[in-house]
Image: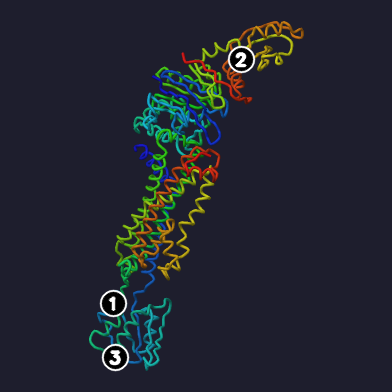
């Protein structure tokens, strides 16, 4: 076991010291942080906090209603200044006292037309529209509280009868977060397992294989390398997750729905369960490819094609968003190479529990078979220097027969 | 007690018979040569000893018992197909390989410095392996094979890529290892190195052991199977002569099995077309013995069903 851990440590350090690892691991979070910060800063800088002016030619608007508590986000609301006529409002605009002004025509609300005037940036009309609605509702003499109900609208909670999960406006951020998390998680796993092709083919190309397998068992060699690469993947995921968390914490000050985000523990639990079998499945395939080929480049070409089997769910994104329970998506959820990503993409959009359990069981069984096949092919192909294994040899290796 | 005992071992790959009924023993404090032409089955035999391949028949014991995973720590192995991680620095690579053989990091580093100093690699320790010459890489691999002070050293073509100075240095190292009581198994085509270093050899041809025993005894047994001549005439057509070559004005004749120098002498004396000024029964070189035996056994000119000739271990 000691050699297994020594190999894992060596492989881990060897990978994390490469330029490509530093670029992909630190570059992606840096990009996320920079883009996130630019977005948040531009959002805050772009919104002017100058008051809005209005000219009420209809005599409809009661300034006291602007202070009604049901008009949410009182602290963030812009100040409204009433002007007697358009000339006065225009002068205020040109003097920079307001960012724009609205003109409510006489006879409103018969024609429902309000005009807005501005010089450079079009003012956000949300606060003024809420103010107008509040005044119109006041005119209707509704029962007490009815104005608030109409202005705030319903709070919709969608419950999935199969899985028991529920989703509301507050949870939408978590769905997006799960989506992004799954995306990064999966590509880190695919990337690091993909290194196994390189690692196995590298050992053959460098002629180090025979020296290593006479220092430890082939199982220790491969398991050590796989664990080292899992460490690489987890390091990447941790750094990416940390950077996403930093961006969210900072951006939450400027973007309201981010403030309502919570850690999606159930999502993390499911993906913790999927992580090892998914990794083992990919790793088994990559080890087998690395054992069959003679050069790293050949292995990368084959694994590149194989990767399509894993990223296929992305081609069904429109379907996932429009009809997440369609039969084809159920198939992709159960199919071992696509289950991991499909579960991530469907998470939060209504994923029946039976599908999660069934896909996990299928994934575990397939992963075990993948490792078993890989071990047989590896033993046969590990000393094939400069000579590619033919298909009949691969089949013979799987059957445990000599060619 | 023998460090390695190979008894009647066989191995087939599909329809190809790679090794057939090979037996030998290797003892502590000796350098043992495994010889044979290309494709004879040497590497397959070594790989079975190392438990990389499983034999189809026969038994192999290491240190008096069947192979166990723990034995790997007591073996230093430098295979025929070898190399180091090209894009890694030399010293950490050697430390890693040493720790795989049971040394801790500190001990590995402590032992590494004198080895690297002795083999002129210390100044190159921070270079990537790919920056080193072939000879330097070869010396680094020798260090990786010996640094953990193994009881059994198995080394395939140890002198490949070494210049004469380094070849001499490596020979000195092997002799020191032998004096330290280690068993060294060496596979090489360089017969003069085998003659200079090996106590005993096994010659494998077409998967079979055709010659086995102490080098001195083998040479003695084959004395009389070679003749050195000086004179005028054609000598390669003489009956019973397997090979005739001329070096520095002298003819070296290798004789077939059962052909005595007297028969050749009589044949020459009765031939009016040749004139002899010097006739000498020569002790054959190991290379002569190798070529003759392999030819006889069909390793170079295939024939079937020839029995192994073995000289028992003294």
Q: Could you tell which of marks 3 and 1 lies nearer the N-terminus?
A: 1
Residue B305, quarter of picture: top right
* Residue lying at the far front of the rendered structure: B305
Q: Secondary structure at mark 1?
A: loop
Q: Which residue is mark 1?
A: A72
Whether residue A270 is visible, yes or no, is yes
C-alpha span from label 1 to label 2: 110 Å
Q: Are marks 3 and 1 in contact (CB under 8 Å)?
A: no
Label 1 chain ID: A
Chain to which mark 2 belongs? B
Q: CA distance from mark 3 to mark 1?
A: 21 Å
Question: Looking at the rendered structure, which numbered label has been put on residue B257?
Answer: 2
Mark 1 or 2: in front is 2
| Residue found at the far bottom of this picture | A107
Residue B2 picture location, percent across and down: 41, 20
Chain holding disc 3? A
Residue holding disc 3: A140
Q: Residues within 10 Å of mark 3 (few under 14, many from 20)?
A: few
- Find the distance from the CA under tag 3 to the CA under tag 2: 126 Å
Which quarter of the figure has residue A217?
top left
Bin the neighbour count of mark 1 within 10 Å (Cα to Cα): few under 14, some 14-19, many 20 and up: some
């Amino acid at each position: 076991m000691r050699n297994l851990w020594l190999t894992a440590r060596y492989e881990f350090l060897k990978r994390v010291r490469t330029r490509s690892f530093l670029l992909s691991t630190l570059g992606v979070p840096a990009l996320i942080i920079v883009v996130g910060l630019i977005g948040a800063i531009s959002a805050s800088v772009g919104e002017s906090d100058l008051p809005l002016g209005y000219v009420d030619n209809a005599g409809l608007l009661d300034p006291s209603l602007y202070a009604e508590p049901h008009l949410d986000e009182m602290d963030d609301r812009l100040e409204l200044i009433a002007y007697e006529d358009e000339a006065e409002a225009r002068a205020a605009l040109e003097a920079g006292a307001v960012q724009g002004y609205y003109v409510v025509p006489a006879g409103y609300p018969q024609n429902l037309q309000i005009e807005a005037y501005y010089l450079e940036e079009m003012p956000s009309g949300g606060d003024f529209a809420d103010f107008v609605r509040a005044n119109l509702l006041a005119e209707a003499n509704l029962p007490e509280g009815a104005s608030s109900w109409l202005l705030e609208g319903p709070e919709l909670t969608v419950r999935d009868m199969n899985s028991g999960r529920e989703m509301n406006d507050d949870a939408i951020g978590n769905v997006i977060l799960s989506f992004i998390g799954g995306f990064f998680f999966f590509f880190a796993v695919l990337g690091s397992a993909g290194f196994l092709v390189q690692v196995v083919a590298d050992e053959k190309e460098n002629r180090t294989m025979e020296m290593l397998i006479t220092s430890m068992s082939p199982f220790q060699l491969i398991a050590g390398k796989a664990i080292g690469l899992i460490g690489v993947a987890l390091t990447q995921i941790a750094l990416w997750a940390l950077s996403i968390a930093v961006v969210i914490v900072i951006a939450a000050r400027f973007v309201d729905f981010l403030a309502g985000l919570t850690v999606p523990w159930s999502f993390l639990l499911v993906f913790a369960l999927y992580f090892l079998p998914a990794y083992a499945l990919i790793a088994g395939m990559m080890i087998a490819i690395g054992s069959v080929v003679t050069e790293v480049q050949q292995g990368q070409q084959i694994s590149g094609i194989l990767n399509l089997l894993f990223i296929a769910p992305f081609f069904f994104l429109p379907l996932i968003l429009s009809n997440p329970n369609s039969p084809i998506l159920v198939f992709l959820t159960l199919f071992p190479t696509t289950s991991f990503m499909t579960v991530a993409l469907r998470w939060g959009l209504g994923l029946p529990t039976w599908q999660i359990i069934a896909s996990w069981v299928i994934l575990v069984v397939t992963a075990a078979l993948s490792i078993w096949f890989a071990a047989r092919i590896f033993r046969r192909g590990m000393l094939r220097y400069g000579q590619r294994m033919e298909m009949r040899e691969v089949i013979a290796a799987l059957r445990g027969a000599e060619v | 007690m023998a460090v390695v005992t190979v008894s009647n071992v066989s191995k087939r790959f599909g329809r190809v018979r790679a090794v057939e009924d090979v037996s030998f023993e290797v003892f502590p404090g000796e350098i043992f040569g495994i010889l044979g032409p290309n494709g004879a089955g040497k590497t397959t035999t070594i790989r079975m000893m190392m438990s990389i391949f499983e034999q189809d028949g026969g038994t192999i014991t290491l240190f008096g018992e069947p192979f166990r995973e723990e034995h790997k720590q007591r073996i230093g192995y430098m295979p025929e197909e070898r190399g180091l991680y090209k894009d890694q620095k030399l010293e950490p690579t050697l430390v890693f390989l040493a720790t795989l053989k049971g040394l801790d990091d500190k001990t590995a580093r402590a032992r590494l410095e004198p080895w690297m100093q002795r083999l002129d690699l210390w100044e190159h320790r921070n270079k990537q392996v790919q920056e080193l010459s072939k000879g330097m890489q070869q010396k680094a691999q020798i260090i990786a094979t010996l640094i953990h002070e193994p009881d059994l050293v198995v080394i395939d073509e140890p002198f490949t890529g070494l210049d004469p100075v380094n070849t001499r240095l490596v020979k000195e190292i092997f002799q020191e290892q032998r004096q330290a009581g280690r068993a060294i198994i060496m596979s090489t085509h360089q017969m003069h190195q085998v003659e200079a270093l090996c106590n005993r050899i096994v010659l494998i041809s077409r998967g079979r052991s055709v010659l086995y025993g102490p080098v001195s005894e083998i040479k003695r047994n084959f004395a009389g199977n070679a003749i050195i001549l000086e004179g005028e005439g054609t000598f390669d057509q003489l009956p019973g002569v397997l090979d005739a070559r001329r070096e520095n004005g002298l003819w070296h004749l290798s004789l077939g099995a059962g052909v005595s120098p007297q028969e050749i002498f009589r044949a020459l004396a009765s031939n009016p077309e040749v004139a002899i000024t010097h006739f000498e029964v020569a002790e054959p070189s190991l290379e002569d013995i190798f070529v003759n035996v392999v030819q006889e056994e069909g390793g170079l000119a295939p024939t079937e069903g020839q029995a192994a000739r073995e000289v028992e271990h003294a």
